[in-house]
Image (tube, rainbow, N blue to C red):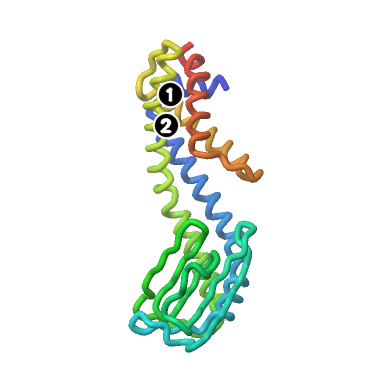
Amino acid sequence: MKKIVDYIKKGNGVGTLWIFIFSTIIAIHSAFFVNKYLPQAIPAIQQFADEILPIKIENGKLVVPENTIKIYTREYAGQPFSIVLDTTKDMIDQADYKSGIYVTRSYIYSINDREVRRQNLIQNVDLPKKDYTQGMHNFVRWLVCGIVLIAPFFNFICFFISVCFYAFCSSFACILNRAQLNFKTKMRLNTVLFIGVYLLSMLIGSLGIKLSLMSFFLLMIALQIVTIKKVEA
């Protein structure tokens, strides 16, 4: 704890190195989970493809299959959710349908308890019925590589902006504690606090408890008030 306080009080810079290291760790963590769990969904996706394909769209009209109704039903968040391919009609009566995705000859509908969205079909698509398993595994590999290479920089930008925001907010904690900290010290302080609270949110998230943005914000402010006095001492 003393080393952390000494870093905040006497360290160099504004914590960008630690933010980037943390951003990289989070990116690798995300890539690990994508590589571990996404391939497990591939058999279900292939099963869905076997049931729903082939599909062919020409000039914004679904031409294959013709005069067909295919229904694929699963549970989502404990509620039944359907994907329906209905080429017997161009439009549907939205009031008669429950939550799900509905594809007609001309439109795709997304229906839930709050709203109904309707979009035109894309102009030209040809998806034959075949085994897409290898292609999906290749996609996962490329996705993992993309996460490892790109996500650290994206995370860094988001985390750095967040730390700057909390450094600005820490002025309130400084007033309460009658403390005076320069900008670099505030940045180092909030870098440490942000990393700690983020890790805490991941930990409780693994237990099925979601830490809301407001809870995250309030926890950061509370920790600022508590820790600034120690940093100032």
Q: Nearer the viewer, residue 113 or 18?
A: 113
Q: CA distance from mark 1 to mark 2?
A: 9 Å
Disc 1 vs disc 2: Cβ atoms closer than 8 Å?
A: yes
Q: Which mark is residue 26?
A: none
Q: What residue is shown at x 61% (from left), y 57% (from top)?
A: 77
Whole-percent x, y for residue 175 in the image: 40, 14
Q: What residue is shown at x 45% (from left), y 13% (from top)?
A: 177
233 is higher (above) or lower (below) than 3: above
147 is higher (above) or lower (below) than 93: above
In the picture of the structure, the residue carrying the numbered disc 1 is 11
In the picture of the structure, the residue carrying the numbered disc 2 is 15
The amino acid sitting under disc 1 is: Gly
Q: Nearer the viewer, residue 205 or 56?
A: 56
Q: Secondary structure at mark 2?
A: loop
Whole-percent x, y for residue 34 in the image: 55, 58
Q: Residues within 10 Å of mark 1 (few under 14, many from 20)?
A: some
Q: Residues within 10 Å of mark 2 (few under 14, many from 20)?
A: many
Does residue 110 show up?
A: yes
The amino acid sitting under disc 2 is: Gly
Q: Nearer the viewer, residue 206 or 21?
A: 206
